[in-house]
Image (tube, rainbow, N blue to C red):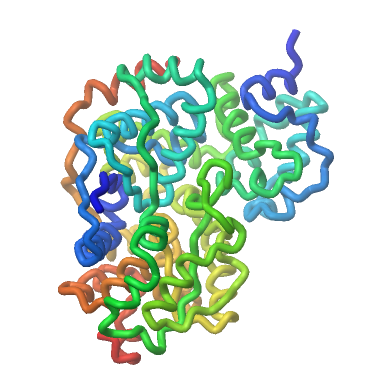
Amino acid sequence: METFLEEINKKIHGVPLQACYHCRKCTAGCPAASYMEYNPNKIIKMIQNGQKDKVLNSSTIWLCLSCETCITRCPNKVDIARMMDVLRQMAIESGVGAREKNILKFHEAFLASIRSRGRINEPMMLVNYKLKSGDYFSDMGAGLEMFMKGKIALLSPKTKDMKSVKGIFDKTQSK
Amino acid sequence: MKVSYYPGCSLHATGKEYDQSMKAVSRALNIELKEVDDWSCCGASSAHATNFDLSIALSARNLIAAEKDAMDVMVPCAACFNRFKTAEHHLKGDKELKAKIEGVVGARYQGGIAIRNPIDIIYNEIGIDALKAKVVKPLVGLKPVSYYGCLLLRPPEVCEFENYENPFMLDKMMQALGADVKNWSYKTDCCGGSLSISKTAIVVDMCDKLMAAAREAGANCVVTACPLCMANLDMRPSQGMKLPIFYFTELISLAFGLAGSTETFKSHMTDPQPLLSQLRLV
């Protein structure tokens, strides 16, 4: 049977995680490391140790900002940003879900907006996110101010060929 | 020169100042923009954070649409630019994936057009001297730090910018406009934009650190080329930490004295007009 490490390496499809010698350069440059449960290099170690549940259940994989500082500076070119994407996708597909629930709900609202219109309609996407997350009241003041300044486009044009956009979702999403 | 133009969702909404100033500056520099036909969202962070194939396919749909015009495609939004370059990188490097994605999109990807950010086009095609020659109102007294954020430059193998740890193209452009650019170490640090709505407390903290560093460098404003950095830095820092944030194209437009150049300042969340009137630039 495939180990957790082998499974991840296959999905990253690049430099295997064993190339990491834990110099911690990724963690030193990571702007989100101080907010994370486990540092980025610790996640690699945990994958090597086969701690699948702990890794997929961690807040770290959701707090990663995808700023790609880690892969840019890694002396061995281990693609940690891609690894975080792989872990998030595994957490979703395996039914573990997201430890940081609102972050996943935001992604879902964002993708739902693309699926229905081809382009993001910010007010509709944000209302959808608020309904999903139950976080109704944050940013009300900012939202109103943006509306007053004309930054919020209530009616934004859609992509015309929605069949092709929907087709992309249907063919790439297992659900 | 003539290029395809992919505005992306941001530039038609919270980043409309970027779209407006980009178009005005392009006209002034004789860059003709032809919008990509029936474009759709690039998928941004939410696609790649949750579904790899979806993220590549959403970007590929637009690259294929842009290929029909057979011109370089200008992508002002750093996030869209990053996603397009990433899709190009994977599609060119992995034949199996390319075949799979072409099946998903229902069209062939040729890979024959260059994906370019306006910073690259203006710096490398138009040039600093041409920029300088068009300045009618030097930005004297404006002390920006340049802020590239993360998505424009990283990873370097994908984005193909030189000096990705200490880029200077924006700095040179701002100097050409007469601004007193301040040096700082945070040019390519992340502002936390992708979690701005879903994890706001962390992002406020990150923005405050950047604003404190900009002030320490002696800056009185920040110049950026990313609509997500703009929205985030313009809105999220704590009271008392905020500085005016500008798109680089807004400052080019202002220094060129283009019609309507001050219009876009009105919709900034952190009002830049007091600073600009104090410096007699508006």
Residue B216 horizontal/vertical position (percent): 59, 81
Residue at horizontal 28%, vertical 48%? B7
Residue at horizontal 24%, vertical 61%? B26
Q: Is residue B194 visible?
A: yes
Residue at horizontal 50%, vertical 18%? B95
Residue B41 horizontal/vertical position (percent): 32, 38
Residue B231: quadrant of the picture: bottom left
Residue A52 horizontal/vertical position (percent): 72, 25
Residue B92 lies, with reference to residue B100, above or below; the image says below
Q: Is residue B258 left or right of residue B181?
A: left
Q: Is residue A98 left or right of residue A49?
A: left
Residue B42: quadrant of the picture: top left
Q: Is residue A109 visible?
A: no
Q: Between residue A23 and residue A153, name the one nearer to us.
A: A23
Residue A9 horizontal/vertical position (percent): 69, 24
Q: Is residue B270 left or right of residue B32?
A: right
